[in-house]
Image (spheres, rainbow, N blue to C red):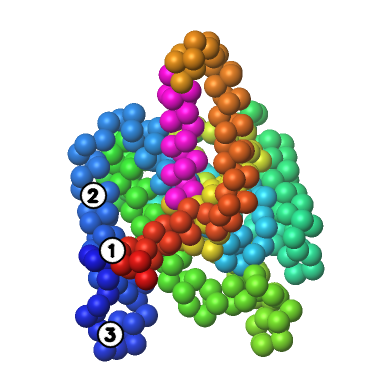
Amino acid sequence: MFYRENGQFKTTYRADQQIFPIAQDRIAILALLVVAFAVVPMLASDYMFRAILIPFLIFSLAAVGVNILVGYCGQISLGSGAFMAVGAYAAYNFFVRIEGMPLLVALLLGGVSSMLFGMVFGLPSLRVKGLYLAVATLAAQFFADWMFLRIQWFTNNSPSGSVSVSNLQVFGFSLESPVAKYVFCLSLLAVIALLAKNLVRGAVGREWMAIRDMDVAAAVIGIRPMYAKLSAFAVSSFIVGVAGALWGFIYLGAWEPAAFSVDQSFRLLFMVIIGGMGSIAGAFFGAAFIVVLPIFLSQFLPVLASLFGIEISTAGISHAELMIFGGLIVWFLIVEPHGLAKLWSIAKQKLRLWPFPH
């Protein structure tokens, strides 16, 4: 009976339309932020930061961007890896070619460059949709791979396409330690996720969802499909581009075009499917699932095999991870197409009725 809104009266429209109308949700989110910003940096190890927390934060940010395009606007995209690559390489060029360029500004300019790139490859969405649009966005992936491998200007004349950054600072604070990188990524994620949540709750978000549900009916009631689709590509590409810049600058430090291959695009799409399409919270669930599951399986499968007297190699573990991962994706598509976010929503609804059956 602790998760109920009985007695929580709203006296203004602003109070009724806030992101978390139930007081328990606001308290839980505030506590989560306090733990993330204050407790985790004191307790987590360097391995936890490098292998789990920082990749989780960056993938969550990228999944938020992909979810805006795929989940809210219904435009299937397989070019997310290309948008991440454009954001990373554009931020790199701004950072190394302009003397005194602040890191934060370079990351945001990388997102803007990715936004323009995404809008160009989003133009086919005005004429095609579904599988045809997926193939059109896949062209962005192949074009980005060719561009960063063949045009050496983007990689500062590096013949292999590999670039690196060092001595990163934000407002005079060094980002060399894992804790500093974690706090920086967490701060960016919190700000952008809040902006994205407010955006999808507003008029623009309702236009995206109308296009997703039925674009012909949306056009009949006065929604401009061109504006809605291109704005979805623009916002999504910007967020994914910032995530790509963070992936290169903060997580990798040195990277090449293979770091943003088509596998990265599929991985982000799987995050949205597993976490829940059309849900900002689903991006976090999907990213946690994708990041934690391989680590858990790499530790659990050898133990399970030893119990049955089976010797399993490292390659066998890797193949088993892929099979289990693919099976779980199929299971989610069949059993719960709305992903982990829907299961979380159902659990909260049951808590609102607990302990009564009706």
Residue type for callout 1: Pro
- The residue lying toward the viewer, choosing from 333 and 157, is 333
Residue for point 30% across, 30% down: 46
Q: Residues within 10 Å of mark 2 (few under 14, many from 20)?
A: few
Residue for point 55% across, 77% down: 206
- Secondary element under disc 3, as helix, strand or loop, is loop
In the image, residue 52 above or below residue 127: above
**Residue pointed to by mark 3:** 10
- Secondary element under disc 1, as helix, strand or loop, is loop
Q: Which quadrant holds the C terminus? A: bottom left
Magenta residues, start to end: 285-303
The answer to which image quadrant residue 158 occupies is top right
- The residue lying toward the viewer, choosing from 93 and 38, is 38
User: Is residue 301 rendered magenta in the image?
Assistant: yes
Q: Main secondary structure of the magenta part?
A: helix
Labels 3 and 2: the sequence-earlier one: 3
Q: Which mark is residue 35?
A: 2
Image coordinates of residue 279 in percent, x first then y, are 49, 62
Residue type for callout 3: Lys
